[in-house]
Image (cartoon, grey):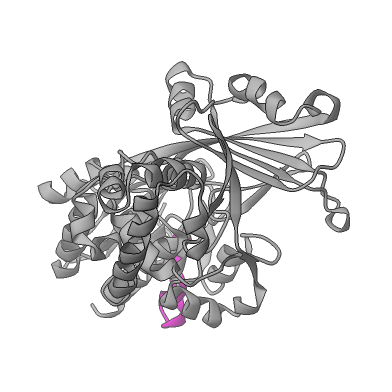
């Protein structure tokens, strides 16, 4: 079965694919989006199960990306941003608790447990980060090549000290991104920090994260539950996409194809990739994220905790969300696994029900748990964030450069090619659209 020809077919409806589709449709191109799941948005969106609401991935939007902010203006979403000022968490460690500021600034100097020498190193480091603002791009990890060559743990020890790593960097990266500092390059830190200094807020969308994909898809045709099997760039003819839709195998044609699925799922779709490109895509890795969302029968006070790595239990982030009577929303607890606990869950096949792994620590954190427990939902995200290991960002840049120099009509897009952020995914989608429009 062959369906109508399109100017562009976009495979995958995460933010990279949706941004590419939006820009291309705005430029007058006919666009058909194919999404394997049952809703668009990928790791940006919301779900509700038995009254338990949760995000499909991203929970916050950082304010530092000028291109992304321009996109929000175009979409009419700027007025729908709700700023969350001075976001912080109480970190729990073996030697007591302390406040961790998620946005770097003067308050970071007051973090307890830092010796005077490390506090003094904050000033020159902060100045060096301010100086780097003009040469780094928060949407592109490859804009700090020197930092990409070094793991975040050694970078932090060298530039600021081991206590800064243990009491500030590790709790934040484990709690917000499920990353261990030795597994990733310092490029993310070195490209985003210059643009966070002086900022006091992050954003959420009024009405939830679904607002962004819903706005981006306007103007394009989107088909969910469409599993793409192969993509071919045929000499002398249009590109051909073979997909399974509603149980039937369908062949679609287009002048261009954007492959915007996760990087480690992209290579099998294209048979004739160049060896160096296939090697890069085969090397893309993601971390996994496990969360248990608990619905409570009573209300709770707002609370958010991160945990020091030394002596940590299986929970990396613990958050209490009060009930919202106006929305009919019951109080909830968000309990996110540590990287080690997530790895153990995957290795032992326990990803379908994570509660047994964390229930002891959960009761310590919330003694009223048994009295207030109403329901729970386990969320397992197999591919949460691309792992920018040391040297990876420069490999991604080389892949992008080869793609831009190629005459092929297949374009790859995703956060794994730019930065592990919503804004990085959007930047990759913008890049894909520019490549096609300039062809």
Residue 270, horizontal then vertical, whole percent = 25, 48
| Image side of residue 208 versus residue 3, left or right | right
Please tell me in which quadrant of the rendered image residue 294 appears: top right
- Magenta range: 22-33
Q: In the figure, is residue 374 to the left or right of 138?
A: right
The residue located at (29%, 45%) in the rendering is: 157
Whether the magenta-drawn stretch holds residue 24 is answered as yes
Which residue is more in the foreground, 130 or 217?
Answer: 130
Q: Residue furthest top?
A: 348
Q: Position of residue 323 (x, y in %)?
A: 82, 48
The percent coordinates of residue 115 (x first, y second) are: 40, 47
Instruction: Answer yes or no: is residue 255 visible.
Output: no
Q: Which of the 4 image quarters holds residue 404?
A: bottom left
Q: Is residue 97 magenta?
A: no
Q: Nearer the viewer, residue 98 or 282?
A: 98
Q: Residue at x 31, y 49 (%)?
A: 156
Q: Is residue 35 left or right of residue 277?
A: right
């Amino acid at each position: 079965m062959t369906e109508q020809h399109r100017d562009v077919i976009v495979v995958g409806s995460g933010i990279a694919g949706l941004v590419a589709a939006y820009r291309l449709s705005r430029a007058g191109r006919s666009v058909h989006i194919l999404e394997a799941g049952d809703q668009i948005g990928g790791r940006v969106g919301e779900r509700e199960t038995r009254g338990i609401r949760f995000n499909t991935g991203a929970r916050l939007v950082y304010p530092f990306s000028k291109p992304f902010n321009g996109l929000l203006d175009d979409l009419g979403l700027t007025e729908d941003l709700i700023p969350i000022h001075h976001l912080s968490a109480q970190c729990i460690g073996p030697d007591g608790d302390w406040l961790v500021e998620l946005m770097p600034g003067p308050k970071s100097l007051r973090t307890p447990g830092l010796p005077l020498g490390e506090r003094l190193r904050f000033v020159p480091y902060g100045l060096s980060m301010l100086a780097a603002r003009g040469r780094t791009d928060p949407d592109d990890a490859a804009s700090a090549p020197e930092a990409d060559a070094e793991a975040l743990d050694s970078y932090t020890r060298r530039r600021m000290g081991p206590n800064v790593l243990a009491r500030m960097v590790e709790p934040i990266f484990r709690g917000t991104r499920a990353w261990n500092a030795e597994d990733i390059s310092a490029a993310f830190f070195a490209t985003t920090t210059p643009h966070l200094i002086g900022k006091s807020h992050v954003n959420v969308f009024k009405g939830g994260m679904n607002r962004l994909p819903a706005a981006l898809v306007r103007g394009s045709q989107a088909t969910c539950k469409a599993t793409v099997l192969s993509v071919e760039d045929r000499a002398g003819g249009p590109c051909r996409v073979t997909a399974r839709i509603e149980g039937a195998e369908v062949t679609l044609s287009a002048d261009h194809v954007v492959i915007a699925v996760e990087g480690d799922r992209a290579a099998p779709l294209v048979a004739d990739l160049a060896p160096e490109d296939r090697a890069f895509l085969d090397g893309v890795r993601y971390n996994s994220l496990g969360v248990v969302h608990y619905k409570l029968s009573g209300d709770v006070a707002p609370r958010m905790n991160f945990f020091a790595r030394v002596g940590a239990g299986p929970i990396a982030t613990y958050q209490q969300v009060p009930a919202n009577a106006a929305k009919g929303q019951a109080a909830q607890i968000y309990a996110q696994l540590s990287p080690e606990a997530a790895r153990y869950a995957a290795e032992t096949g326990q990803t379908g029900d994570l509660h047994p792994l964390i229930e002891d620590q959960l009761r310590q954190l919330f003694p009223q748990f048994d009295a207030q427990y109403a329901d729970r939902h386990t969320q397992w995200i197999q591919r949460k964030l691309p792992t920018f290991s040391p040297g990876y960002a420069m490999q991604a840049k080389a892949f992008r450069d080869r793609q831009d120099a190629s005459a092929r009509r297949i374009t790859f897009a995703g956060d794994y090619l730019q930065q592990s952020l919503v804004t990085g995914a959007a930047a990759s989608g913008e890049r894909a659209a520019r490549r096609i429009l300039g062809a």
